[in-house]
Image (cartoon, rainbow, N blue to C red):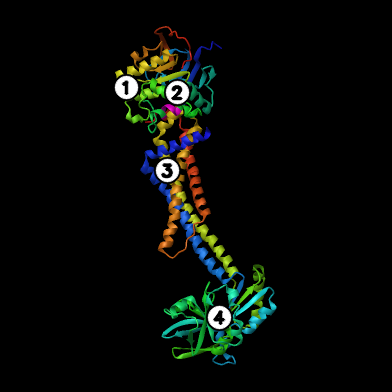
Amino acid sequence: MPADSAIIRIRDVEKRYVLGGEADVLALRGVNLDVEAGSYLAIMGPSGSGKSTMLNILGCLDRPTAGRYFLGGEDVSRMPDDQLSEARGLKIGFIFQSYNLIAQLTVLENIQVPLLYQGKDVRTHLESCLELAKLVGLGDRLHHRPSQLSGGQQQRVAVARSLVNNPLMILADEPTGNLDSKTGQEVLDLIDRLNEAGKTIVLVTHDDRVASRADRVIHMKDGLIDREVVNRPMRARPAVSSS
Amino acid sequence: MLTFQFVSTVRLGIKSLMLHKLRSALTMLGIIFGVCSVIAMLAIGEGASYEAQEAIKNLGSNNILLRSLKPPDQARQQAGGSPRGMQLAYGLTYEDGARIQSTIPGVNRVLPMRIIRENVRFDRNEIPCQVIGTLPSYMAVTGAGIVRGRFLAHLDEQHAENVCVITTGLARRLFPHLDPMQHAVKIDTFYYRIIGILQERSQPEQRTQAGAMEGQPLDNNVYIPLSVSRTRFGETLIRRSAGSFEAEEVQLHQITVQMQNLASVETADPQIRTLLGRFHDQNDYEIIVPLQLLRQAEQTKRIFNIVLGSIAAISLLVGGIGIMNIMLATVTERTREIGIRRALGAKRRDITTQFLVETVVLSVGGGLVGVLVGVLTPLVVSQLTTMKTIVTVWSVLLAFGISGAVGIVFGLYPASAAAKLDPIEALRHE
């Protein structure tokens, strides 16, 4: 086993989709990937490259057909559904392109949702939730509904929500795809700050400028990692697990 | 901790339902009607059977009633050559009473009665009544109550005094402005002094001789000593009608046999049948056992309840299907939300719970409103009609329990459908 500084360790991961006929689709054909704790990784690639499949597997939303995936030292590639759900809730913070807030809940309640599913008492964590809301600049909008917020604000709520269980990594899927460039920049700045504070970030994007913020960019093609670009060495920082 | 989670799940459920107020209200309506109909129908059924049972109980469940019946036409023709010629003799006799008293074990009292229709007059008022000749033990056997004065006494009987006791209803009609006590009423050609006013607990006599069918009030009774009835009216009654006349000879119109306890009622019933059968060659009497009627009434009530209950249960079922239908639509509509929750760490179980709680909130909420409406409906019904209704606690609990069960049963399928959704597919859902 390699050193434990790698949060994500993917070995020969394949994903095959059975479409009913003989024409199975092999979306991933033996991918290997290590992501160090505290790093900022961007995944790029045209549609059909296996990028989305990769994202689903990284996010524990799906299991590989073959190969291994260690998340924080734990093999999640063969986990039953319930454990996988727990891994998602505990180790991964999701940020989606379309924010994916729950419409009938307020900002504060949306931030609290992941707590609920870990059986944590919302009241004892109220303080940290308020802090997170303040961190993303929505301390004064706690009781607004998502429909009363702008796109950028909604995405910032999603960022706060992704942090509430103090996950191992943030998985962001085109976080600026629905935002104009100015608010997109703001959200990306926020993510940068999280990375500076020690959070591991994995970001999937089309946009070169977005990807340029990452330490490291991998390009996918036909279910494999085609090439890898290292923008800069991993940022030096005092502690790996922060806040 | 667990309770907190539960409370917040319920609150979330209510919140989600409040997003579509009209839809939720309409969905609940099915359950409301279901629960309401269960309670209302059972209340009406209960009330109806209560009335029937009370009426029977008033006959006295320890009593066995024997009534004289005019034999059917056929039998009368066969008995045409009777020694009394034109006169038709039938019915119970004094001897029947004496035989029952002396041979049937467990008999407490035997109360003979003669019931004659006559007009009772006071001043210018004339009211058709039942003139009932009976013994002082009438009070003990029927459980009637004296409002004023006293009932007939043994001395009245022995001396064949011309005294009478009248019912409260008759007193009101015959003496609208006067105190009836110590006045004398005229029956046929004789005067009878009123010595008491009786509150009828029931009208055990009125079912005889088509009483109610002649369109007179049911509580017009005059009680006179049996001996007086025998001497003043005789045993032969002549009735003239449309050119022909009929003479009947009847000794007793009714014998009430009071038994010592319920058990002896059961054994005495066949014994009395046998005994009377031996001395009556025609079918000129009937035996009414209130206890058996009571049992029959209870049986009927049970069937009634089952029928009403099933009808109501079907309406609850329909309500449940309505809920299921809406919940399935809701699950489809909220697929995206399910995907988000799954991504944020919700297990299948959490999703199942969420939707199940929502369904149960709908059905239990409907159940609560239904209970309210269901308790009020019988009240309104008994206000508008003369029907008696009784809302029993168990019917409320039953209806409410069923509404909860309906929520769970019809919520399980949509909830498990929601939980089975693939998170990736669900997240992609627009």
Nearer the observer: mark 3 or 2; the answer is 2
* Category of crowding for the residue at label 3, using alpha-carbon neighbours closer than 10 angstroms: few (below 14), some (14–19), many (at least 20): some
Q: Which three-letter amino acid code belongs to the residue tagged 1?
A: Leu
Give the letter of the chain under mark 3: B
Q: Position of residue A72 (x, y in %)?
A: 51, 17
* Category of crowding for the residue at label 4, using alpha-carbon neighbours closer than 10 angstroms: few (below 14), some (14–19), many (at least 20): some
Q: Which three-letter amino acid code belongs to the residue tagged 3?
A: Asn
Q: Position of residue A60 (x, y in %)?
A: 48, 23
Q: Which residue is mark 3?
A: B325
Residue B423 visible in the snapshot: no
Q: Is residue A102 left or right of residue B74?
A: left
Quarter of the image for residue A164 reads top left
Judge by depth and name the residue closer to the eye, B185 or B306. Answer: B185
Per the image, label 4 sits on a secondary structure element best described as loop
Q: Which residue is mark 2?
A: A128
Per the image, label 3 sits on a secondary structure element best described as helix
Task: Estimate the spatial distance between the alpha carbons at disc 4 and disc 3, rounded to whole Å.
Answer: 62 Å
On whether disc 1 and disc 3 are found on a single subunit, the reply is no
Q: Which three-letter amino acid code belongs to the residue tagged 4?
A: Leu
The magenta-colored residue range is A109-113
